[in-house]
Amino acid sequence: MIVRLELHIALQSPITIFIGGFQLSCDYIALANSGIQALQPYQAGKPIDELQRELGLEHIVKLASNENPLGPSQQVLDAVNKAAADITRYPDSNGFELKQALAEKLALAPQQITLGNGSNDVLDLIARAYLEPGKSAVFSQHAFIVYPIAVQACGARAIVTKAQNWGHNLNAMIDAIADDTRLVFIANPNNPTGTTVDEAALVDFLDKVPADVVVVLDEAYIEYTDGAEGAVDGVALLAHYPNLIVTRTFSKAYGLAAMRIGYGLASAQITDVLNRVRAPFNVNSLALAAAKAALADEDYLQRGRAVNRAGMQQLTQGLRAQGLSYIPSAGNFIAVEFKGDCGEIYRQLLEEGVIVRPIGAYQMPQHLRISIGLEQENALLLAALKKVLKQ
């Protein structure tokens, strides 16, 4: 018997197998979950080393992924170095020490905390726990792109409400809740628009949500609101709304993007559900140690907030001086509107050694999202923009 295997290179092509003269074909994309078949992979911001390989540039400024420009805290580096001595051991799957530190800081019980490989991991856990074919989830236009990915991957139906002034329209979201709705996602501040919801409006919204609909309040950028007037602290709402989940991350203000660690806060019952689908050892030992140290380093957090405030002022003044419009942002990034071809502007900025983020996937083809950097990085961005826009 002759067995001949032909592998087609194109991703969408099936694998063709010849056995005993018979041809058997299998399309492994068609075998996948029906929701996954139509998905496109998440596109992250372009890495610095990738641009270096492509264009041979030596000095590159990355303002694409909303990373903390300060670099790591020394306390974090010390904690990671100490934890590295035990990398032959599995991490504490329960994350006892970090949960204790979070519980003390947030005045919650450890049984209300779910740890994840970044808050994206927690969002995915929530979707897998509460969504399936025949169920639906509500989220806003221009909201974080992980929501539709997580919903569709579960085979559930996405209900997308029209944005209001680039932000969430909570009245429209209430009206959109259907009999089969199990989740509502609210990003506050929202990525990529930087918009926020008002506390009074959010409380009114939560009062109207049915008890069998779980509301996810994504607070990945909450530390940058820094107690601003009208800012919402989701943790304070948990005691009043048993159907609320608050998700947060150490990737942004705490400067641990590469460590991939975030967490969810909810009732003990919801937390128990999430831990039933959470993979064992989903957070590594170095990340656990780094997050605990970062949580205790209040000076680093305050310096990061100060740098962000100053950088936001520097960028907004510079953008106005160039006649550019932008969406006022409560995060560590700003969405800037352009009249020309955003794709071409993005490419020309890359040639100048500046990486920003196109957000056409968010139905914002005329905007680029720019992260707040250090003073000199912001200055280089503004100079590059001025040069590109004159061409």
Image: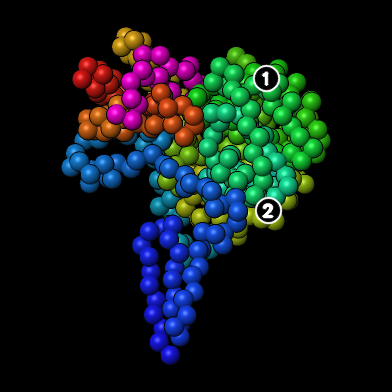
Residue 333 is one of the magenta-drawn residues: yes
Colouring method of the image: rainbow
- Numbered label tally: 2
* Rendered image quadrant of residue 343: top left
Residue 371 is left or right of residue 293, and the answer is left
* Rendered image quadrant of residue 85: bottom left
Any mark on residue 275, and which? 2
Query: Where residue 318 sits in the image (x, y, percent)?
Result: 32, 13
Mark 1 surroundings: few (<14), some (14-19) or many (≥20) residues within 10 A:
some
Nearest to the observer: residue 260 or residue 163? 163
Residue 325 is left or right of residue 278, and the answer is left
Residue 130 is one of the magenta-drawn residues: no
Q: CA distance from mark 1 to mark 2?
A: 29 Å
Nearest to the observer: residue 51 or residue 161? 161
Extreme residue toward the right, this view: 211
Q: Secondary structure at mark 1?
A: helix
Q: Secondary structure at mark 2?
A: helix
Q: Is residue 21 above or below residue 180?
A: below
Query: Where residue 391 sits in the image (x, y, percent)?
Result: 20, 20
Q: Is residue 292 visible?
A: no
Nearest to the observer: residue 196 or residue 361? 361
Query: Where residue 279 sits in the image (x, y, percent)?
Result: 60, 58
Any mark on residue 199, and which? 1
* Rendered image quadrant of residue 3: bottom left
Any mark on residue 85, and which? none
Q: Is residue 196 above or below residue 291?
A: above
**Residue drawn 47% across and 18% down?**
327
What segment carries the magenta color? 324-344
